[in-house]
Image (tube, helix red, strand yellow):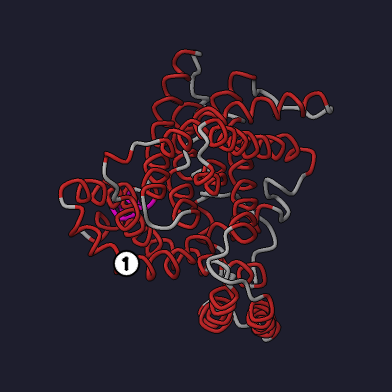
Amino acid sequence: MKRNLQGYIKFFVENSLLLILGTATGLIWANVSLETYTEISHYLHFAINDIGMAFFFAIAAKEVFEAVLPGGPLASKKEAAMPVMATLGGMIAPALLYISGTMLLSRSDLTRGWAIPCATDIAFSYMVARFVFGAKHPAIPFLLILAIADDALGLIILALFYPVGSVNLLLFALFTGAAVTVTLILRKLRVMTFWPYILLGGSLSWLGFYLGGFHPALALVPVVFAMPHAQTDIGIFEESKGDLTDPLNQFERWWENPVAVVLGLFGFANAGVAFTTLTAGTWLVLAALLLGKPIGIILSCAIGGWLGLHLPSGMRWKDVLVVGCAASIGFTVALFVSTVAFTSGPNLDAAKMGSLLSFGGILITIVLAKLLRLKPALR
């Protein structure tokens, strides 16, 4: 019985089903009784968006950090060059397409949302790519490098372009500097459990981000980079990570299930928008994601080829197109960026709806793969 329960929990976590369930619940509730949904979700926003999501972004930062370690996908400049190039195109093209749309429609009030379509939801993109390519296809590590680099740049964009209040660099520097110092001292003392790092360093960093005017959901990122970690990267989504005992991997294992719950509550608290909010902002976000991502990735890979870079052995241009479609699923991160780009109102609701509808990128990827006659690589 216990083993079956653990299996169900693992299935729900690995397939982000709690996020989907929370999102669907919030969306349905808002369209049945918007008033009661708004009243309840309002009480969740601070706890989930400003505190709970800090652990989500901490795990994302961990994957980015470990990717540059020996054995990681970003450790080899030669192998990482083309997918990183694809990342740049996959962020620049959607942003330009979105901004062009706001100018064409004379909707300068929507311009602040330019970073929303830059996002890639690594979990869902990976899931659909595994389905169409198979686990052993070179497109899989290509997509993972692209998504990890996207996460890294996304964290920078959030910090630099979306302050949540009046920026106070002095307070920010004092508290985050103290947080990193405490973390390094604990590391020097060879503290091998993650809790002191999070409770001491994490709390100081959260105060630094909050008082400094930056989004506190990013607060654990500096602490993650300073914590003791494995010396090599064995790969994202690898089962054998459970054998690693360093504090950073302990942190990920302990928080994996709670973060799945946080994402479910995040989906519920933020996805509840009325279907009547299908306005200009919705279509701009959706078009920038579903069109801008694959176009940007294809063009940047073409430029990379002109510069002398190469696609991984066994990967074809039609594979790049399908990867671009898989990367167009913004969903979780796009939804989060929507909440920091706009305040409550029609523009926020429209952007949220566009982020949610980007889930359709899964269907587009599968259909395109069938039309191009792609077959999963078994080995």
Q: Nearer the viewer, residue 81 or 271?
A: 271
Q: Position of residue 34 (x, y in %)?
A: 20, 53
Q: Nearer the viewer, residue 38 or 9?
A: 38
Q: Tag 1's secondary structure?
A: helix
Residue drawn at x 58%, y 43% is 147
Quadrant in which the N terminus appears: bottom left
Residue 326 shows in the view: no
Q: Nearer the viewer, residue 215 or 133?
A: 215
Report which residue position mark 1 lands on.
Answer: 44
Q: Position of residue 61 (x, y in %)?
A: 59, 59
Residue drawn at x 67%, y 45% is 73
Left or right? Give the position of 8 relative to 226: left
- In the image, is residue 190 part of the stretch drawn in magenta? no
Main secondary structure type of the part rendered in magenta: helix
| Badge 1 amino acid | Leu
Which residue range is magenta in the image?
A: 7-13
Q: Nearer the viewer, residue 304 or 17?
A: 304
